[in-house]
Image (cartoon, grey):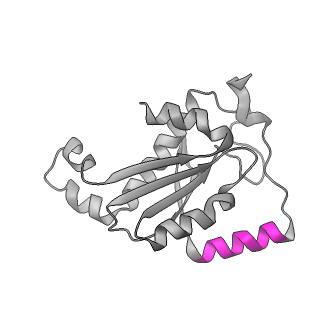
Amino acid sequence: VGRHLASTMSSPSSSPSSRRATALLNLFFKAVPHDLLDLEGAGTLFVAGPTGADHLVLLCAGFPDDHSSLAPLARRLAERGCLVGVCSMPEFEREGPLLRPQGYTLDEIPQAFAQAAAALRAQSTRRSALYAGRSSRAASDTTTLSVVVHDWAIYPGLAFANN
């Protein structure tokens, strides 16, 4: 059932209120492209908050929600000093034909989460500065990454967190 889960999902309707919400999000969030498995730059992470933050938070909406459902929480976390990245399930918000019409397996979705987390970590200037002259293990201990998942993103988020 879950093998081709993402291929059965379609993006939410593009209602006027949804378009207004997206326009408001674009004022506060920076859209950061990231790799989506083997597809270079096919994923999008919406980032807000201070790049020098000690605490990074990755929020992922599950079906049938898109990133806008977590935007109010992300904004509040960013205003309180966290560097926050918001994403949705792979290709859920993509307009036009899917890049992987066969969908994503339950093993591949956590890999996509890992790529989104790497994109968030790459936005951290504090982390970038701390990488200089240190092993990756030492650098990874300098900031905290919390992962918050919702609805259909819970299983792949748990799999990502346990790897």
**Residue 49 appears anywhere in the view:** yes
Residue lying at 80% horizontally and 45% vertically, measured from the top left: 10
Whole-percent x and y of residue 50?
A: 39, 71
Residue lying at 81% horizontally and 53% vertically, measured from the top left: 12
**Rendered-image quadrant of the N terminus:** top right
Whole-percent x and y of residue 52?
A: 32, 68
- Judge from the rendering whether residue 1 lies leftward or rightward of residue 54; answer left or right: right
First to last magenta residue range? 17-27
Q: Nearer the viewer, residue 68 or 40?
A: 68
- Judge from the rendering whether residue 92 lies leftward or rightward of residue 72; answer left or right: right
Residue 82, picture quadrant = bottom left
Whole-percent x and y of residue 8?
A: 79, 35
Whole-percent x and y of residue 18?
A: 79, 66
**Residue 48 appears anywhere in the view:** no
Residue lying at 78% horizontally and 69% vertically, measured from the top left: 19
Residue lying at 85% horizontally and 71% vertically, measured from the top left: 16
20 magenta-colored: yes
Q: Nearer the viewer, residue 134 or 59?
A: 59
- Judge from the rendering whether residue 89 lies leftward or rightward of residue 35; answer left or right: right
- Judge from the rendering whether residue 159 lies leftward or rightward of residue 142; answer left or right: right
Q: Main secondary structure of the magenta part?
A: helix
Q: Nearer the viewer, residue 162 or 115?
A: 162
Figure check: 127 above or below 158: below
Q: Residue furthest left?
A: 133
What is the tally of numbered marks visible in this picture? 0
Figure check: 154 above or below 22: above
**Rendered-image quadrant of the C terminus:** top left
